[in-house]
Image (cartoon, helix red, strand yellow):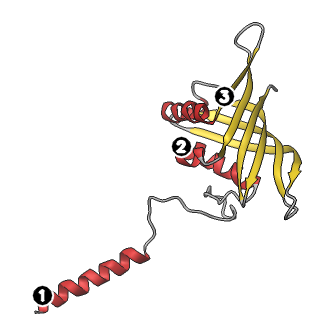
Amino acid sequence: MINKISCLCLFFLMSGLFLTCNNPFAPGTAAGDETGTLLLTSQLTPDEVLQNFQYAYTFKDSLVYSDLFDSSFIFLSTNFNVSPPEPLGWNRDQELRIVGRMFRFFNTLDLTFNSVLRRDTLAISVDDSLPERIEDTITFTLTLDGGSGIPTLLGEVIFTYFRKETTWRIVRWEDKQI
């Protein structure tokens, strides 16, 4: 009888501990980055999208990365490795495959968004007067594997964000040559 009661008490004690504990393997979420640590956000603003973008690169998290982009996403750039240079472009599925390979290939990825050079509101919703589309021109620094084999990349991008309900996602990414 005492053995059954002890087992039952132990069971309830352990159950209570598991119900009140956080998953140590799950990333944290936060409304802001007050502590200087990189946390996931709910993407309630374009700045939170950028924070999640940086998180995805830092931790090579393809699930977080895939949530940054709308299903209508398009990537635009220019291929300067051919003469004359040719335009490049691809959709969300291709972007996820390419970056997934990059996440697997490099040991470390250090992405920093340096500054938003320009922010334009492209569309306002009729019902609540909040922006539905915003375009940012942003400078960035990307260091791969600590810069040992590939020099640090400095670049400029134009991101167009789309708000659906409360969540922002990238619908267009254009690489700019600097």
Instruction: Left or right? Give the position of 16 relative to 103.
Output: left
- Disc marking residue 132: none
Tell me: 42 left or right of 107. right
* For marks 3 and 1 on the same chain, the one whose residue lies earlier in the sequence: 1
Task: Name the residue type under label 3.
Answer: Trp
Q: Give the residue number, with chain letter if any, for mark 1.
A: 3
**Residue for badge 2:** 62
Q: What SS does tag 3 mark?
A: strand
Percent position (x, y) of residue 129? Answer: 88, 62
State the separation of the CA atoms marked 2 and 3.
18 Å
**Quick check: 165 above or below 172?**
below
Image quadrant assignment for residue 151: top right
Q: What x and y, as percent, mark residue 65?
A: 59, 45
Q: Residues within 10 Å of mark 1 (few under 14, many from 20)?
A: few
Please report the residue visible at 66 percent of the width from the left and 64 percent of the height from the top: 35
**At numbered mark 1, what does the secondary structure look like: helix, strand or loop?**
helix
**Which residue is disc 3 drawn over?**
90
- Residue 152: x percent and y percent? 67, 30
Q: Is residue 61 visible?
A: no
CA neighbours of label 2 inside 10 A, class few (<14), some (14 to 19), many (20+):
some
- Residue sitting at the far bottom: 1
